[in-house]
Each structure stands twice: as structure tokens, then as C-alpha cells.
């Protein structure tokens, strides 16, 4: 089943849709040798074709969009566009507001986070051939800000399950959102029906105002403006699984066991939530993987229809002519293909853009996003990548080879995984650790970068938050410091 195209920019007809992306001077063409691409180059066709971070959708949920800096960069190609534009920005116009982290640190970014645009002229006569698909706009990730096109009204609160210690923070947050912010709060049905929550008579009035939903039955894609997670990294992964197209901005509070993806402390939730509702928020776009599983299964006529399955895989489409079932899902961390309960090595073939590159003989293979590089892939020996690096990581699990190292490929590539004809057993696939299912010889798994990222709200900024998580949660490079040597004087040499 083909993925629905992302919402087109500049469509003001739908009242509940997010606003279009404002033009910015921060955008830079990847190939500065030519003129900046026009608006027609940034449409959904290019987004689906290139599958890169620069083409990710700029619309999150119903009424939140990414706000971009208006300050021009020196020497950028955008200055050409400004000179040709009939409307110039007046010098008296209010300058863009710095992010919270910059105000604290007292400095400004001096470099483009993606690096400088390459010179496309080589020597006196050679240059890169410019085509209609060779230019794309890249905004500096450090300038990514969110702004409300309309005031938010609906908030989804996700609480970590089976954790009684989160009941009080959950009740406190819901009371704040409903009574003080006058927002509609959506929660899971099983949370509303929680026995401990129902016993609290002081919370009964607020509990009656909560809007329950049931995973796998209720579609929230057109209703939620903001997601607030209370728990660990699993709550953010679960929130991502609920939205298989555009994802509303996610604000995650660290109330779980690890919390690498949850930068906010609950002690200051009133201030932080108020800042987000008022539009004062830095953001990082966490890319996701679009996974399509094609199975050769002959089903009865009664089963050949669209179905909802576990909430994670929203649709199962059966092609009645070919007898193939197609499952499609967007994952935030990784897709894992392993040998399952079999004692044999897994033997799967990997194809990149239709070309066979290698066969994995071992316990399996992990295909992860930069966000997922600090999860299962890190435990399997892969390097950790910043979420703003546009890439896909391929990591073998216990390969029976001394030279099979993890590799990183461009985000725009299409990876296909199939069982090798010589495989002695089947394989099993899981999506962010969920919906585990068997893969047989006639099945295939296709993985590409999705155009629907998870807009994760930063507590400080996208660089500091990531390194803070490495240090505090993963204890990266923790070592007792070596003591310095004392200087040896001439007198001590004489005494010796």
C-alpha cells in the first residue's frame, strides 16, 4: 500500500490543518552553483523521491509548524533571491528571538550544522551537472523553532504503564492542563479506568473531563495538537507508533528508568509547558523509517480487506489478485530481523537500491535511524549518531565474520531484506520491539527514510540535549581522571 503523500505546503483550505512553512533566508541550496530552487521543488514528489531529512514534512499535527529564522546568512545563495524579490525586509523589523539555550550561554551559532555547501566547480572547466532533482533546501537545524498557527486545544498525555509512582505527576499535569490552560486532554482508556485513579475522589471531577481513546480503534491523527509523555524512552516510541503520518510535537518528561529521549524535568513542568503553548520552543526532527513488509499469503475471501492490527501497523492490505499481504509501518528506533527461536544462523540478503550488497549470516541485522543508533544498535557495537545526521545505519547482530562492521548509508537509499535461497530457517522481524512476526522465503522487507519525522521539543538545544543524555544516561566516556605529575625541580634531582 502506497504511503499517503505529505500535506502540500501552502494549502490554507483546511481549517484544522497546520500552517504552511514560512519562507526563510536560512535555507541554503545543497548545490550553490545554481539558483535557489523555487517552491515547486519542495513539493511532496521530491519528498517521496529523495527521502532525506531536508525533505521531511514541515507540518506537525493540526496547528503546529516549524518556525525558521529570518536572519540572512553571509555569503549564502539566499542573498540573490532577496535582491530579486520586490519586497525587502525593513531594517527596523524585529530580529528573531534566540533559543533559550543561547540566551543562557550568551553566544550565537557561527557555523551551519550541516557543514558548508560544497563548491560545485572543479578546476577551470569541470562542474556538477545541474538537474531538476539535484537541488534541495536545507535549513540550519540549530535555527529550528516551532510556532502555533492557531492556539492549541487538544493535548495527548501518555503515561508509562504499570508504574504507580506516576499517578501523582499525571494527576497534577492533567489538573493544570484542564483547569488552568483550558485544554482538552486525551488519555488512554486503560488509564482512565485505572482502579487507583478511580479511588481518588478529589480527582473525580478532572477524570470525568478526560477524553479516553483506545489504541488500534481510535484514530488521533486529526485531533491532537501536542503530545506530552510521562515516563521513559518507551513512552516516546509508543507515541510515535500512534501516528503513522504527521506527528504532533512531542514534549517528553523524564520519569522513567533511562530517559535518553526525555530531556525535561517534571519539577518545572508549569514553566516548560507554558513556554511550549506560547510557542517558545526549540525542536529537533527525529527521522523515522518507513517499513513495508510484503508476504505471500493465500487467505480466505472473507479476510481480504483492510484491517487494523495492534495499533502499530495501522493497515493490512490484501491484494486479492496476487495473494500478497502488505504491511506498512513507521518506526522511530529500528527494524530488527533475527533468527528467532531457531538454532541455525540467520541467512538474509541485503539489497541497496535494487543491487545485492551482502548476505548476513549470524543472529540477525538491525536497520536503525540516528535516534535508534543509541539503542539496540549501540549494544551491537555500532557508533552513536546525532539525530540530525541524515543516514540509515545497518548493524549485524553477532555476525559469523571477523570483518562485518556496522555501516552507515545515505538516508535516501532503499534497503530491501529477503531470506537467502540457501537459508535453513525462517527469520523474524520486529518494529521498535513490537509486532514481532515471521518472515518466510517468499517475503520481503523494504526500508526507506520516512517523510514524517517525530518533532521532539528540546529542553535546552539540540546539541546540548544530546550530549547531556550521553553523559547522564549512557555515561559516555566515564573514566577516573588521570592525576597530573608534579614538576621535578633541580634540587630534587641533586638529592637523588
Image (cartoon, rainbow, N blue to C red):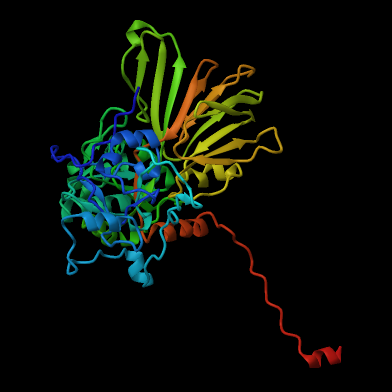
* Left or right relative to 85: residue 352: right
Q: Nearer the viewer, residue 45 or 303?
A: 45
- For the point 28% across and 62% down, the residue is 71
Q: Nearer the viewer, residue 148 or 176?
A: 148
- For the point 40% across and 66% down, the residue is 110
Visible in this render: residue 458? yes
- Quadrant placement of the N terminus: top left
Give x and y (percent) for residue 178. 18, 50
- Quadrant placement of the C terminus: bottom right
Give x and y (percent) for residue 26. 31, 56
Quadrant of the rendered image containing residue 43: top left
Give x and y (percent) for residue 421. 61, 16
Q: Pick out the residue farthest to the top.
A: 301
Give x and y (percent) for residue 192. 26, 39
Q: Nearer the viewer, residue 441 or 338?
A: 441
Image vertical order of residue 128 relative to residue 337, above or below? below
- For the point 41% across and 39% down, the residue is 288
* Left or right relative to 388: residue 61: left
How many numbered marks appear?
0
Visible in this render: residue 436? no
Image vertical order of residue 429 relative to residue 385, above or below? above
* Left or right relative to 373: residue 192: left
Q: Nearer the viewer, residue 20 or 462?
A: 20
Amino acid at each position: 500500500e502506497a504511503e499517503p503523500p505529505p500535506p502540500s505546503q501552502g494549502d490554507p483550505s483546511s481549517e484544522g490543518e497546520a500552517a504552511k512553512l514560512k519562507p526563510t533566508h536560512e535555507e541554503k541550496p545543497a548545490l550553490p552553483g545554481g539558483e535557489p530552487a523555487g517552491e515547486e521543488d519542495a513539493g511532496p514528489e521530491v519528498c517521496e523521491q529523495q527521502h532525506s531529512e531536508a525533505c521531511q514534512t514541515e507540518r506537525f499535527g493540526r496547528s503546529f509548524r516549524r518556525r525558521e529564522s529570518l536572519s540572512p546568512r553571509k555569503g549564502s545563495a539566499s542573498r540573490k533571491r532577496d535582491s530579486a524579490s520586490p519586497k525587502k525586509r525593513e531594517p527596523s523589523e524585529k530580529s528573531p528571538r534566540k533559543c533559550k539555550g543561547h540566551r543562557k550561554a550568551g553566544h550565537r551559532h557561527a557555523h551551519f550544522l550541516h557543514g558548508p555547501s560544497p563548491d560545485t566547480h572543479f578546476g577551470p572547466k569541470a562542474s556538477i551537472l545541474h538537474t531538476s532533482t539535484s537541488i534541495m533546501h536545507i535549513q540550519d537545524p540549530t535555527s529550528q523553532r516551532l510556532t502555533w498557527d492557531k492556539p492549541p486545544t487538544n493535548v495527548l498525555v501518555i503515561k508509562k504503564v504499570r508504574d504507580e509512582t506516576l499517578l501523582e505527576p499525571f494527576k497534577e499535569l492533567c489538573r493544570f492542563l484542564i483547569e488552568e490552560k483550558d485544554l482538552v486532554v486525551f488519555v488512554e482508556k486503560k488509564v482512565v479506568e485505572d482502579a487507583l485513579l478511580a479511588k481518588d475522589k478529589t480527582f473525580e471531577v478532572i477524570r470525568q473531563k478526560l477524553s479516553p481513546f483506545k489504541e488500534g480503534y481510535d484514530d488521533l491523527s486529526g485531533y491532537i495538537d501536542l503530545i506530552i509523555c510521562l515516563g521513559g524512552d518507551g513512552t516516546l516510541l509508543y507515541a510515535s507508533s500512534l501516528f503513522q503520518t504527521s506527528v504532533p510535537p512531542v514534549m517528553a518528561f523524564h520519569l522513567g528508568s533511562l530517559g535518553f529521549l526525555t530531556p525535561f524535568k517534571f519539577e518545572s513542568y508549569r514553566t516548560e509547558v507554558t513556554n511550549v503553548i506560547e510557542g517558545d520552543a526549540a525542536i529537533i526532527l527525529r527521522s523515522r523509517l518507513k517499513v513495508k513488509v510484503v508476504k505471500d499469503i493465500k487467505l480466505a475471501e472473507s479476510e481480504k480487506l483492510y484491517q487494523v492490527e495492534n495499533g502499530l501497523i495501522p493497515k493490512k492490505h490484501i491484494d486479492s489478485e496476487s495473494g500478497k499481504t502488505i504491511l506498512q509501518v513507521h518506526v522511530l528506533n529500528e527494524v530488527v530481523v533475527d533468527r528467532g527461536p531457531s538454532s541455525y544462523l540467520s541467512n538474509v540478503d541485503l539489497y541497496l537500491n535494487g543491487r545485492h550488497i551482502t548476505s548476513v549470516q549470524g543472529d540477525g541485522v538491525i536497520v536503525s535511524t540516528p535516534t535508534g543508533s543509541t539503542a539496540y544498535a549501540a549494544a551491537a557495537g555500532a557508533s552513536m549518531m546525532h539525530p540530525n545526521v541524515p543516514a540509515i545505519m545497518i548493524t549485524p547482530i553477532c555476525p559469523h565474520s571477523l570483518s562485518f562492521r556496522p555501516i552507515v548509508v545515505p538516508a535516501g537509499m532503499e534497503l530491501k531484506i529477503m531470506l537467502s535461497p540457501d537459508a535453513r530457517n525462517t527469520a523474524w522481524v520486529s518494529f521498535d520491539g513490537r509486532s514481532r512476526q515471521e518472515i518466510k522465503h517468499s517475503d520481503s522487507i523494504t526500508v526507506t527514510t520516512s517523510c514524517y519525522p517525530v518533532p521532539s521539543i528540546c529542553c535546552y538545544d539540540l546539541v546540548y540535549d544530546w550530549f547531556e543524555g550521553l553523559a547522564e544516561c549512557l555515561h559516555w566516556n566515564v573514566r577516573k581522571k588521570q592525576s597530573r605529575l608534579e614538576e621535578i625541580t633541580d634540587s630534587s634531582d641533586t638529592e637523588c
